[in-house]
Amino acid sequence: MLLIILTAIISVLIGLLIGFLIRKNISEKKIGTAETYAAKIIDDANKQAEAKKKELLLEAKDEIFKLRNEQEKENRDRRAEIQRLEDRAIQKEENLDKKNEIIEKKNETLNKELNKLEEKEAYIQEIVDKQLLELERVAGLTTEEAKDILLEDVKKQTIREQASILKESEAKIKDESAKYARKIISTAIQRYAADHVAEATVSVVSLPNDEMKGRIIGREGRNIRAFETLTGVDLIIDDTPEAVVLSAFNPVRREIARITLEKLILDGRIHPTRIEEMYEKAKQEVESTIKAEGENACDECNVHGLHPELVKLLGKLKYRTSYGQNVLKHSI
């Protein structure tokens, strides 16, 4: 009986020992697996961090490159503007020098003419005095009588000289007038042509204040870039007080850009997303106006049944000019 009990106890102890060893082995395997998994997670995290680091470095380099290009472009534009202002100042200085030279020449000419007149006056007075003495001696006339005769003679001679001078002056004036008239006509033609081209390619938008220019440009110029890219119109911001200029050869695009900018100024919120929203509204507004103008033109001309595209093309003539006249109104 005792042997059976001892055998049972030993069996239990052996079973416990075997269970302990098996559990220990399983635990060690789990720990090894966990360590391997943890090492894999750490390795993956390191790889992701390295990839993210490279990506951020590439983005930073790209941004630096863009900023450098923008800065170089801005510097080139500033240098060009400074050069333009210097050229204008030099031109003005040259013009002033030319004007001063012309004035000096005119003064010199006038002084010469005055000297000639003074010499001529002295010469005439000398002749008069001599003739007075001669008349008194030969004719036995009194001084007053001799003066009257001489004055009459001088008067006739003066009239003849004045007539000759007037003829020369008249010819000179006609010649100078013709030259001056040609110059005026040439200048007028040039100015009219310049005004017509400017009128046909630019639109001026008024601003409530000059601070609005900075808001239109936006941080790092993102607003103005978004506006120009979206509308296809150049937005010119210079020193003109409380105004900016829109420049484009396409009048419809320029009109859409004008309405877009005016809506943005009125709204006060200027950023790329808002610019796109206002652009779509302005585009729809202009398209509606084009359609209405085309239909009105058809009604005025009593023409019906035109294809919608032709009506649209007709309406676009509202925004075109030729020799200062509105093409749509002139055509009707």
Image: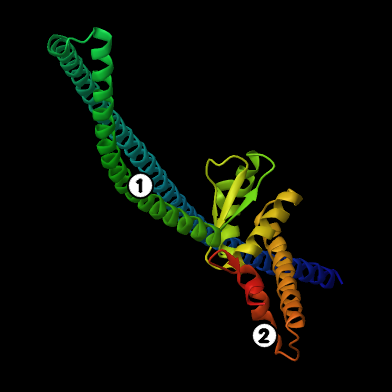
Give the SS element for disc 2: helix
Quarter holding the N terminus? bottom right
Q: Quarter-wise, where is residue 45 in the image?
A: bottom right
Q: Which mark is residue 309?
A: 2
**In the rendered image, the vertical position of residue 266 relative to residue 135, given as above or below:** below
- Residue 103 position within the rendered picture, expressed as x and y whole percent measured from the top left: 30, 29
- Residue 139 position within the rendered picture, expressed as x and y whole percent measured from the top left: 16, 13
As drawn, the residue found furthest toward the bottom would be 305
Give the SS element for disc 1: helix
**Residue picked out by circle 1:** 177
- Residue 151 position within the rendered picture, expressed as x and y whole percent measured from the top left: 27, 19
Query: Which of the two labelled residues, at mark 2 and mark 1, occupies the earlier sequence position?
Result: 1
In front here: 223 or 156?
A: 156
Describe residue 10's horizontal placement relative to residue 245 as left or right.
right
Q: For label 2, count other residues whose C-alpha is less than 10 Å away and answer few (under 14), some (14-19) or many (20+).
A: few
Which residue is found at the position 25% from the left and 34% from the top? 160
**In the rendered image, the vertical position of residue 159 relative to residue 234, given as above or below:** above
In front here: 45 or 195?
A: 195
Is residue 43 in view? no
Which residue is found at the position 55% from the left and 50% from the top? 221
Q: Which mark is residue 199?
A: none
**In the rendered image, the vertical position of residue 178 relative to residue 241, given as above or below:** below
In front here: 7 or 254?
A: 254
- Residue 287 position within the rendered picture, expressed as x and y whole percent measured from the top left: 71, 73
Describe residue 143's horizontal placement relative to residue 304 as left or right.
left
Describe residue 4's horizontal placement relative to residue 159 as left or right.
right
Describe residue 84's horizontal placement relative to residue 14 as left or right.
left
Q: Quarter-wise, where is residue 276 in the image?
A: bottom right
Q: For label 1, count other residues whose C-alpha is less than 10 Å away and answer few (under 14), some (14-19) or many (20+).
A: few
**Amino acid type of disc 2?**
Glu
